[in-house]
Amino acid sequence: GDSVTQMEGPVTLSEEAFLTINCTYTATGYPSLFWYVQYPGEGLQLLLKATKADDKGSNKGFEATYRKETTSFHLEKGSVQVSDSAVYFCALSNFGNEKLTFGTGTRLTIIP
Amino acid sequence: DAGITQSPRYKITETGRQVTLMCHQTWSHSYMFWYRQDLGHGLRLIYYSAAADITDKGEVPDGYVVSRSKTENFPLTLESATRSQTSVYFCASRQGNEQFFGPGTRLTVL
């Protein structure tokens, strides 16, 4: 079945550092890929998505590129801020499947 | 306000008691979902519903019951709560291939 593997946390960075959170997936066909963010005490919010190979999703300075050849969808940001501290989830949705498959989440803490 | 609301936000109960978590959405989305979030497991799907009166099991359905008599409501019932059901529960609805999440219910079973 479908699965998502993302890098273990927690990740702690200084403000303005470069961020990468790795995500790889296993799925048949051509899934859509997502990054969700969960701020403390809140539900998940969609951060960005990509629906086909080589698409780049971007939002709030975050980017991720759908790489079919490496089955990856790594999340990057050039300069993180304290307000980016949250838990980040990689997820996929396969065509004809209404469900999302989530990774285990990566907790990110940015220190001033 | 438009969106998804969950109630209660926090609940403490005892082993063996019945508990119902409520979920309400204002968009009239067809699909709704219940997840539980546990450390080290991410989000796991408990049940989902494609429309009123249509429900199906997810990854971890044991010990839970759902119903959906109206499109906008999707309650989750723990018929006899166990300590292993201590978790944070999220409801979500779907439009297209995007899911929208409620704020969550933190449930503690003593």
Image (spheres, coloured by chain):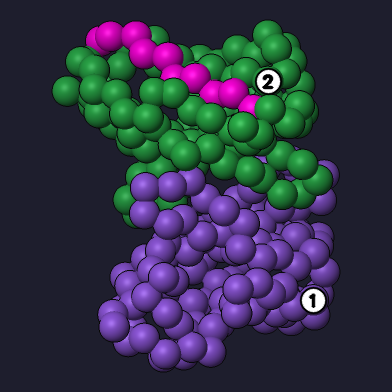
Report which quarter residue B48 is drawn in. top right
Percent x, y for residue B36? 44, 37
B101 to A8, vertically: above or below: above
Badges 2 and 1, same chain: no
Colour seen for chain B: green
Kind of residue at badge 2: Glu
Residue located beneath label 1 in the image: A55
Q: Residue at x 48, y 46 (%)?
A: A43
Q: Which chain is purple?
A: A
Magenta-drawn stretch, dominant element (helix, strand or loop): strand
Residue under the image location 66 percent in, 57 percent down = A92
- Report x, y in % for residue A60: 60, 73
- Where residue B31 sits, quadrant-wise, is top right
* Residues shaded magenta: B16-25
Residue farthest toward the left in the current orientation of the protein:
B110
How far from the left and from the top, in percent, is residue A39?
A: 42, 57
Front-lying residue, A109 or A11: A109
> Mark 1: which secondary structure?
loop
Marks 2 and 1: which is nearer the front? 2
Q: Which residue is drawn at 71% across and 49% down?
A: B98
Write down the residue under mark 2.
Answer: B72
